[in-house]
Image: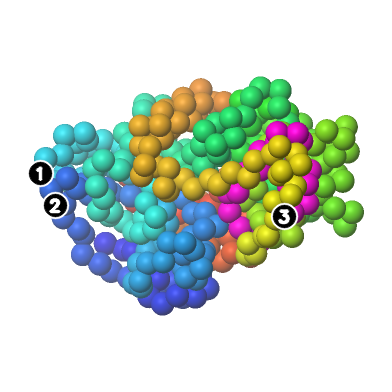
Amino acid sequence: MKALLCTRLGTPDVLEVADLPVPRPGPGQIVIEVAYVGLNFHDTLVVAGRHVVKPDPPFSPGSEYSGVVTAVGDGVQSVAVGDRVVGNEEYGCAREFLLVRADRVTVLPDGVSDKDAATVLVAYATAYHALVQRAGLRPGETLVVLGAAGGVGSAAVDVGRLLGAEVIACASSPERARAALAQGAGQNLSYGEDGIKERIKAATAGRGADVVFDPVGGDVAAAAVRATAWRGRYLVVGFASGAIPSVGLNIPMVKGASVVGVFLGEFVRRERDVHEGNLARIFAWSRNGDLSPHVHAVLPLEEGAAALTELATGQVRGKVLLRVGGRTA
């Protein structure tokens, strides 16, 4: 089989396509012929050795996939050969055949394509978990999404709209901020030289944001925390800027606000049943045509290095997929 491999840590151009044996399942395991792999910004950090997850080379990037079960090991009863499934791992998915534990996959419902499943899995699962379980977002509340043109940011705009929030989309340029209007944002703001705090305050008639969804970090974070409303919730989702911010705890204190961490991987491990319920709602939205994810590009496995380079340099709006297997639906 073909696999996209990171043989040494660094920038995405270290990746290469190699031939590996097709795996065989052991007890409790299954083999999946991969159809699509969804790429995310954090994949670039894993390849660089700058993520909290630090595998030793060689390994494949890619943390989410869709595909078809081709073999099952002893004791597996939850899935069968021929089932279409979707799943996410910490890394390792960018290859033609994938060996995983059977209890880490979800059988795809009819009406959701392999492509759509790989498009929405991690970004939308992260956004939904953040906004529902971590923030308790309520209809009518104001949600500010930073990095709204990126994969997880645009998903948060979409999910916030479906949950009934008033969504303000923020991005690094007016063009990228305007792109989020297609996801259902009511307003769009660029960070601007005069500061995002003042822009958020003006957009909310001085009240501030009930919830801030922040996958960006860096300099914009402290200003966004200051722009929260009374009892606001600031969601720490990631650090796409490359800088982990320091925020004065006096600001949450005087606002009665919360700074809340979001880590999908650990949530899935610890609360699998809740995660499965989240996915059921996300896939129902997808089947009904309620979601509006933007796919930036669908590229072959051989162009995985180029795809991750675009993610690393901020050239992507929405989602990048790798088309891997021949059997895609």
Q: Can you tell which mark lies on residue 74? A: 1
Pick the quarter of the image with the N terminus: bottom left
| Secondary element at image label 2 | loop
Q: Nearer the viewer, residue 279 or 178?
A: 279
Q: Residue at x 33, y 49 (%)?
A: 34
> CB atoms at circles 1 and 3 under 8 Å apart?
no
Which of the two discs, 1 and 2, labels the residue nearer the N terminus? 2
Which region of the structure is painted magenta?
221-241
Residue 253 relative to residue 71: left or right: right
| Secondary element at image label 3 | loop
The image shows a total of numbered marks equal to 3
Q: Nearer the viewer, residue 224 or 20?
A: 224
Q: Position of residue 282 (x, y in %)?
A: 48, 30
Q: Can you tell which mark lies on residue 26? A: 2
Inspect the image, locate mark 1, and give the three-letter code of the amino acid beneath it. Answer: Asp
Nearer the observer: mark 1 or 3; the answer is 3
